[in-house]
Amino acid sequence: MHTSAMTRPLPQTEWHPALWQSRTASQQPLYADVQALENVIARLSRLPPIVTSWEVEALKRQIADAQRGQRFLLQGGDCAESFDDCTSDKIAKKLKILLQMSLVLVYGLKKPVIRVGRMAGQYAKPRSADTETREGLSLPSYRGDLVNRQLFTPSDRAADPELLLRGYERAAMTLNFARALVDGGFADLHHPEYWDLDFVGHSPLEAEYRRIVDSISDSLDFFESISGHSIQETSRVDFYASHEGLHLLYEQAQTRYIQRRRRWYNLSTHFPWIGMRTAQLDGAHVEYFRGIANPIAVKVGPAMTSEWLQELMQVLNPNNEPGRLTLIHRFGAKCIEECLPPLIQAVRGAGALVLWSCDPMHGNTEATAAGIKTRRFDNILAELETAFRIHQEMGSYLGGVHFELTGENVTECTGGARGLTDADLNRAYLSQVDPRLNYEQALELAMRIAGRRVGGT
């Protein structure tokens, strides 16, 4: 891949956002028109940031609380966002299901919940192969709307630098609308009925959900009646955005040096993460991530060794800064018993401050007899429950979950309260890449977690 430094002068610091270009960068698209790419990156670098450094620092403080067992992280959203899904209705539905899940978790866990969406920037996806072949024709793989288009034609699959600008615009619009909803009282816990999704009226979980809502409303009314004061904090919530920091030129263009903090920030999102495919110690992604001040996460899979993890923690958080590093493990129900304990021991042995989060989605992907990619709810739940048990048995704390989900009535994962089967998948399978939990399945998982009464350290 051709790389290009940003055109504006960079502050003289030990690290700068283009330093990754001296390393091997995997999972990067190839652009035919280098000049067009450079022009787009230069334009991106001059556009206003999507988030602010004080929002980033506020999230880091909350993650530090979660590391101490005082909060719980809920991170969820689409596998890969689509530009076409940047509509008010779809954004509101994603926000609603995350708010509903967080309401259940607050009630059950008796602690504040950090709400983070896989949204407003989740437009790039890693792929296992650079090309895809159909009927003898090989074309570049679809790498997300930030890079190319899904249609299988040479022009659609060519990497288009203009899509980087479209991605920036849609990310900004998505987050601005989510902020407006939250600031306008959309998340007011006094009135959770305002953001009920239609399914609650016919879900098998309706009675339990209604009991939780009524209990929270009664508690608020009681406290306010005896104190004579309104609980203002319940009228709005903090909401943060996250995405995989995969396309390094895009991330670089929105990385700014904040003079008063004397640190670099990726201001395209609050909470970027590194995937397993790009977590090489000598790779470009680790080099880029080590220099930004954001709270960051690393996906941890079966291939991760104790030595590799300890070195990653040293590179990415050399000062052991609270709130800086989250480890999102994703082993699959079949592998978690074997893979997770050694890594917990490695973290403990290094004396590292991390927040452990469980992604029970990616390790449980499979194909049906008809070749449809899906995930079984029972496997997702099994990995999640095993993760909580292992952390508890080892004196660790599982302080977060990471789900691919949607607020729509899709049929992409089987099982759950409605007992979806393989035959149901064709009814409403809408994902561009990986299967997501629908709103009922997502809420059921939140209720299962809340029922555990997860403790802190």
Image (cartoon, rainbow, N blue to C red):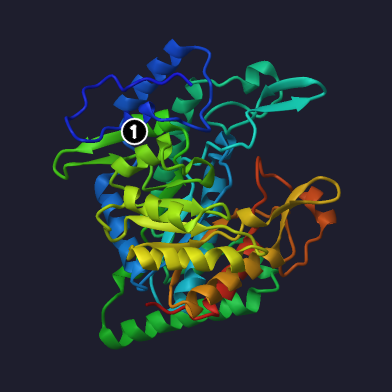
Residue 161: x %, y % from top left? 48, 21
Residues 265 and 412: in front is 265
Q: Residue 410 vs residue 356: left or right?
A: right
Residue 372: x %, y % from top left? 78, 46
**Is residue 37 at least partly visible in the picture?**
yes
The quadrant in which residue 131 appears is: top right
Q: At x 36% / y 59%, what residue is drawn?
A: 238
Residue 224: x %, y % from top left? 32, 82
Give the vertical position of 260 relative to 66 (above or below).
above
Q: At x 50% / y 55%, what residue is drawn?
A: 305
**Is residue 268 at least partly visible in the picture?**
no
Give the vertical position of 273 relative to 141 (above or below).
below
Q: State the residue lying farthest toward the front.
A: 307
Q: At x 81% / y 45%, what residue is drawn?
A: 371
Q: State the residue lying farthest toward the left.
A: 260
Residue 287: x %, y % from top left? 36, 38
